[in-house]
Image (cartoon, grey):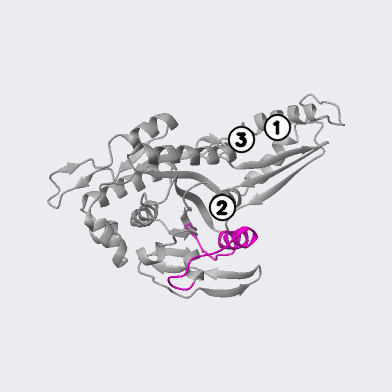
């Protein structure tokens, strides 16, 4: 058994125990991801109260057995009377990924839509949650327009039924607003709506759920990150230094909750001419690579600027699906394959 400390805890003893608990939990390795549950951001809200341990465990639908492993592992402490583990998961969803950017206008939603399409082309079952309350453009980019959301009654209460486009299951906060009207939500209402969209959507069996986050690091972003079993984030940036600086702020938010950065996508890397034979670096060069080196995360891909990408989003057919031989489509396919390999699916 592991050595005990006095049962009536001072703040110093509580901190010591918290460190000991964290170190022991780091011995629990997730085989598929080849990393420990603490480093993967699965353990959150860890608290030590007297001789009791409280924590939240964020897992995919195939990792539910980790709860019992955590309880069994912490029973090695002879001071620990009981471990309370709140299991946080999205039913039937194996892997939840976030797509994030430090600022708006860098093409985050374009990347999320085309990445979802590229993952679906691998044969995976893919869902896309458009949680960007400031610019929910995913329905238009997938040709859904302003479709009505269906709500059904289940044994667990009311559930939203996601829409489907091009084989991708889709839910968007934009579907709750009138066309051309802003989502003027504040505080508690915003928190409630976002929480409902995370926990009350009947996704069915999914291999990947991508969450298109709002840009920045405000209440909406923090709520989504704290409420979701996100196993990693893909950061979207453009080459210029202003965008890179904003991404660094987002990284700090993810690190606070232990969500790892899976990689960097540099969008608008260069202007591709119509014949595809020449390129101009109109927003600078090398920003994505610089950020990748700083974060020690891979640069997953560099997406060019081309009219086809914009046109695909406007008409609801992502370029990754409409022209698989197009350069940008091949880059999105490369990114999807790199994620599949990284997650060992």
Residue at figure coordinates x 36%, y 31% from the top left:
290
Crowdedness near tag 1: few (<14), some (14–19) or many (≥20) residues, C-alpha within 10 Å: some
Most foreground residue, 62 or 120: 120
Which of the image's four quarters has the N terminus?
top right
Would you name the residue on which mark 3 appears? 28
Would you name the residue on which mark 1 appears? 21
In front: label 1 or label 2: 2
Residue at figure coordinates x 48%, y 68% from the top left:
162
Image x and y of residue 252, in percent = 53, 37
Image x and y of residue 231, in percent = 52, 45
Please give the label number shown on residue 224.
2
Crowdedness near tag 2: few (<14), some (14–19) or many (≥20) residues, C-alpha within 10 Å: many
- Dot 3 or dot 2: first in sequence order is 3
Contact between labelled residues 2 and 3, with CB atoms less than 8 Å apart: no
Q: Give the range drawn in magenta.
A: 178-206
Q: Say whether residue 317 is visible.
A: no
Asked if residue 196 is among those painted magenta in the image, a careful observer would answer yes
Most foreground residue, 46 or 138: 138
Residue at figure coordinates x 39%, y 51% from the top left:
108
From this view, report whether residue 55 is shown above or below residue 91.
Answer: above
Q: Residue furthest top?
A: 3
**Quarter-wise, where is residue 240 in the image?**
top left
């Amino acid at each position: 058994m592991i050595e005990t400390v006095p049962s009536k805890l001072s703040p110093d003893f509580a901190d010591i125990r918290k460190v000991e608990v964290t170190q022991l939990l780091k011995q629990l390795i997730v085989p598929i991801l080849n990393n420990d549950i603490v480093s993967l951001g699965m353990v959150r809200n860890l608290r030590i109260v007297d001789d009791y341990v409280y924590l939240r465990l964020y897992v995919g639908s195939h990792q539910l057995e980790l709860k019992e492993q955590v309880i069994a592992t912490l029973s090695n402490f002879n001071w620990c009377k009981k471990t309370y583990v709140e299991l946080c998961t999205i039913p039937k969803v194996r892997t939840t990924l976030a797509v994030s950017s430090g600022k708006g206008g860098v093409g985050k939603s374009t990347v999320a839509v085309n990445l979802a399409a590229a993952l679906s082309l691998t044969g995976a079952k893919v869902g896309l949650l458009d949680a960007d309350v400031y610019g929910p453009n995913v329905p238009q980019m997938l040709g859904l327009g302003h479709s009505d959301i269906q709500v059904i009654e289940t044994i667990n209460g009311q559930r939203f039924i996601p829409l489907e486009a091009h084989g991708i299951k889709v839910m968007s906060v934009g579907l709750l607003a009138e066309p051309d009207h802003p989502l003027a939500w504040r505080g508690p209402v915003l928190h409630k709506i976002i929480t409902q969209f995370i926990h009350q959507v009947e996704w069915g069996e999914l291999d990947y759920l991508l969450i298109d986050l709002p840009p920045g690091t405000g209440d909406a972003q923090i709520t989504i990150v704290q409420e979701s079993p996100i196993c990693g984030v893909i950061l979207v940036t453009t080459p210029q230094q202003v965008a890179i600086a904003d991404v660094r702020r987002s990284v700090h938010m993810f690190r606070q909750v232990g969500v790892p950065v899976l990689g960097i996508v540099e969008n608008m890397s260069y202007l591709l001419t119509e014949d595809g034979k020449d390129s101009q670096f109109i927003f600078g060069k090398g920003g994505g690579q610089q950020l990748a080196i700083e974060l020690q995360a891979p640069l997953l891909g560099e997406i060019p600027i081309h009219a086809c990408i914009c046109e695909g989003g406007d008409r609801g057919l992502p370029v990754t699906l409409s022209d698989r031989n197009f350069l940008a489509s091949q880059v999105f396919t490369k990114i999807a394959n790199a994620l599949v390999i990284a997650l060992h699916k």
